[in-house]
Structure formats: C-alpha cells, structure tokens
C-alpha cells in the first residue's frame, strides 16, 4: 500500500479547485476524488454528463418553482 499523494491532492484542491485551505482540509479523500472525477471526466463517473443526465438534473432541480 502506498502513501496518500498529499502533494498532488493539495495542488489539485488548492490550485485547480481554488479551495480555501479550511475547505480543502474539511474534505475527505473520497470527496476530493469525486471532485477530481468531475473536473477531469475520469473515474467511476464514466465521463462527462450527457444530455439525458442533464435533463434528469434539470427536472429534479428546476431553476424556478412550478405551481
């Protein structure tokens, strides 16, 4: 088992995501990994969000309330 890559994680969290140090250190490694997948489109997520996924999100979280 190798050590956690803290230098790379800090470069990504603080440099790419531009998190404040308190926000970065409040994240779990799993949360940081999911953020990395979201930015790069790699990992368990299977790539970028497609049209169907976007439509489902728009329906689940509309910009305006429907009455």
Image (spheres, helix red, strand yellow):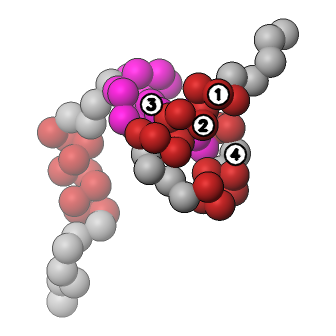
Q: Pointer 3: what residue?
A: 37
For residue 18, side relative to residue 62 (left or right)? right
Element at label 3: helix
Q: Single out the mark in the foreground, 4 or 2.
A: 2
Q: Which residues are magenta?
A: 31-46
| Prevailing SS of the magenta stretch | helix
The x and y percentages for residue 37 are 44, 31
Please name whichever residue, 15 or 50, is drawn nearer the observer in this view of the structure.
15
Element at label 4: loop
Q: Residues within 10 Å of mark 1 (few under 14, many from 20)?
A: few
For residue 41, side relative to residue 45 (left or right)? left
User: Are the residues at dot 2 and dot 1 in contact (C-beta closer than 8 Å)?
Assistant: yes
For residue 9, side relative to residue 40 (left or right)? right
* Lower sequence index among marks 4 and 1: 1
Q: Pointer 4: what residue?
A: 28
Q: Pointer 2: what residue?
A: 10
Q: Residues within 10 Å of mark 2 (few under 14, many from 20)?
A: some
Q: CA distance from mark 2 to mark 3?
A: 15 Å
Which residue shows up at 22% across the image and 47% down it? 54
């Amino acid at each position: 088992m190798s050590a956690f890559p803290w230098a790379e994680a800090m470069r990504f969290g603080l440099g790419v995501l531009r998190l404040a140090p308190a926000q970065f250190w409040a994240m779990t490694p799993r949360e940081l990994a999911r953020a990395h997948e979201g930015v790069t489109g790699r990992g368990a997520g299977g790539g970028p969000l497609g049209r169907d996924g976007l439509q489902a999100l728009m329906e689940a979280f509309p910009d305006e309330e429907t009455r």
